Image: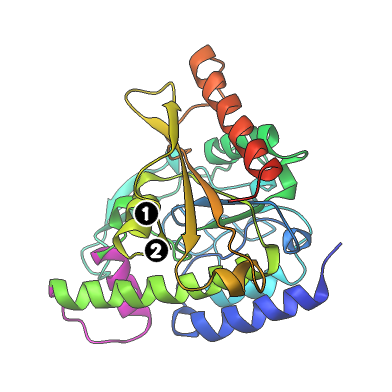
């Protein structure tokens, strides 16, 4: 059931902080609005995937390619997770060069006729559902979001390319110096972080699962959390040399606001590989062992939330 007071709090903060990016493609919370309440587990990807140059190429309902403003509007009545709906299958298309569509240098051209995955069956959806189903009583109960709310074609584009996308949508100066790009990215990250702080204040989570090494690097680089540079435990992910890592951390300068007056408790953060590349939906003993390790660490954090 939707917590109307929590929804109103979140909506007000999100609209204030993200207003400069309302015309950019992206989303803020992927799970149903009923998850925005006291909630032990929050799950993050790095940012919405796909191609921001294509707006609703297939006409799927519910729409999955939205502006930030439209996404906030949709969340008010969202009663199912975006991990459960149909997503476009751009893999069946091909790239086309767009030399006259600055700042995009290429984009997907969808297949003809357009193709899409059955509801919930895109690779990322399946793997997120598999992981969350192991760590919470029902996969749809966790709050699902992304560290950055704006869409890029590739997570590695976060930085210069993401700043260019926003600069284009917002009619900001087109200078491309590294200093201006870094400043623009800092503004984006600060806006997203303030929204996350409101989500944390509502949910008071005990565990944050971050499914991206790139997101973890940005969290560390910008000092958004304290005391989280060295993992307290880790295990092999069953994919190359990748690890799953556990950290104990505190929100910088805002534990009291986020976790309640007088509380000195922090949060357990579990960093796992990006789910587009970590095939945990394909049965293999070492990967399933890693998933169960993550599930055990989540349960330990919930049961022993006393640091």
Residue in front for this viewpoint, 17 or 74: 17
Scheme of image coloration: rainbow
- Residue pointed to by mark 2: 53
The span from disc 1 to disc 2 (Cα, nearest Å) is 9 Å
Image coords of residue 213 (percent x, y): 37, 45
Image side of residue 277 versus residue 28, left or right: left
The boundaries of the magenta stretch are 160-177
Q: Is residue 31 above or below residue 223?
A: above
Q: Is residue 186 visible?
A: yes
Contact check, label 1 and label 2, Cβ < 8 Å:
yes
Residue at 33% over, 71% down:
165
Image coords of residue 113 (percent x, y): 53, 44
- Residue pointed to by mark 1: 153
Residue in front for this viewpoint, 250 or 80: 250
Residue 228: mark in rendering: none
Q: Is residue 154 visible?
A: no
Q: Is residue 267 above or below residue 159?
A: above
> Is 300 in the magenta?
no
Residue at 35% over, 44% down:
230
Q: Secondary structure at mark 2?
A: loop
Residue in front for this viewpoint, 165 or 110: 165
């Amino acid at each position: 059931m939707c917590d109307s007071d929590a929804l109103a709090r979140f909506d007000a903060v999100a609209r204030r902080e993200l207003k400069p990016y309302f015309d950019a493609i992206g989303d803020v919370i992927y799970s149903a609005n009923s998850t925005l309440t006291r909630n032990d587990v929050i799950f993050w990807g790095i940012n919405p995937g796909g191609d921001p140059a294509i707006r609703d190429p297939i006409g799927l309902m519910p729409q999955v390619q939205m502006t930030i403003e439209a996404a906030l509007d949709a969340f008010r009545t969202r009663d199912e997770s975006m991990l459960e709906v149909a997503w476009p299958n751009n893999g069946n298309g091909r790239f086309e060069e767009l030399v006259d569509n600055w700042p995009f240098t290429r984009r997907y051209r969808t297949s003809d006729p357009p193709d899409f995955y059955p509801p919930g069956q895109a690779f990322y959806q399946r793997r997120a559902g598999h992981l969350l189903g192991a760590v919470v009583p029902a996969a749809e109960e966790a709050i699902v979001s992304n560290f950055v709310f704006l869409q890029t074609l590739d997570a590695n584009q976060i930085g210069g390319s993401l700043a260019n996308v926003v600069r284009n949508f917002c009619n900001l100066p087109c200078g491309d110096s590294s200093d201006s790009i870094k400043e623009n990215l800092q503004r984006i990250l600060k806006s997203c972080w303030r929204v996350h702080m409101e989500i944390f204040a509502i949910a008071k989570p005990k565990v944050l699962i971050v499914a991206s090494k790139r997101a973890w690097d940005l969290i560390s680089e910008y000092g958004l959390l304290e005391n989280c540079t060295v993992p307290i435990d880790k295990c092999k992910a069953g994919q190359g040399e990748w690890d799953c890592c556990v950290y104990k951390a505190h929100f910088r300068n805002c534990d009291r606001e986020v976790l309640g007056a007088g509380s000195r408790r922090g949060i357990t953060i579990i960093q796992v590989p990006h789910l587009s590349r970590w095939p945990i939906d394909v049965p293999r003993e070492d990967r399933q062992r890693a998933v169960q390790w993550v599930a055990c660490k989540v349960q330990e954090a919930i049961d022993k939330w006393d640091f």
